[in-house]
Amino acid sequence: MIDLYTLIVDYEDGTYVMQAHADSAEAAPSACIEKWDIADIKHIFTEQDKTSILILLKTEQLVALRNMINVWYGSISLNNKAFSFNLILTNT
């Protein structure tokens, strides 16, 4: 079953939210980033940044948040700045 996930990203002074369907929590962050429309925020993220994020996500291990159901945390470094995110299984 392909589930719907919500990815909430904190980077610099902004918070960005996106959704995508994926086969697993491990695949969901990349699926969300691939679908992410950055047209309105080109001054913050470039297509090259998106590519870098996708590469970095391949080695990131999600951490299940304690006392939460279907919520994970992850963090990578993008341009020497923290790119942290929460992933939520959003199926209703």
Image (cartoon, rainbow, N blue to C red):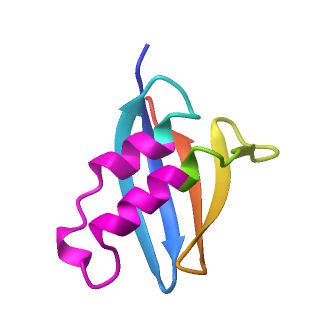
Q: In this figure, what is the number of numbered marks?
A: 0
Relative to 80, 23 lies left or right: left
Is the N terminus in the top left, top right, bottom left or bottom right quadrant?
A: top left
Is the C terminus in the top left, top right, bottom left or bottom right quadrant?
A: top left
Q: Residue at x 69, y 45 (%)?
A: 62
Residue 77 in percent (x, y) is at: 61, 70
Taking the view exactly as shown, the residue that stands out farthest to the right is 66
Residue 90 in percent (x, y) is at: 46, 37
Q: Residue at x 35, y 39 (%)?
A: 20
Relative to 70, 90 lies left or right: left
Q: Is residue 39 above or below residue 66?
A: below
Taking the view exactly as shown, the residue that stands out farthest to the left is 39
Q: Which is more toward the observer, 19 or 42?
A: 42
Q: Main secondary structure of the magenta part?
A: helix
> What residue span does the magenta drawing correspond to?
29-55
Q: Residue at x 57, y 60 (%)?
A: 85
Q: Is residue 61 above or below residue 25?
A: below
When asked about the image quadrant of residue 38, the answer is bottom left
Query: Does the magenta segment cover residue 48?
Result: yes
Relative to 43, 51 lies left or right: right
Taking the view exactly as shown, the residue that stands out farthest to the top is 1
Q: Which is more toward the observer, 26 or 20?
A: 26
Q: Is residue 31 above or below residue 82?
A: above
Residue 80 in percent (x, y) is at: 60, 81
Query: Does the magenta segment cover residue 7?
Result: no
Relative to 80, 31 lies left or right: left
Residue 21 in percent (x, y) is at: 37, 32
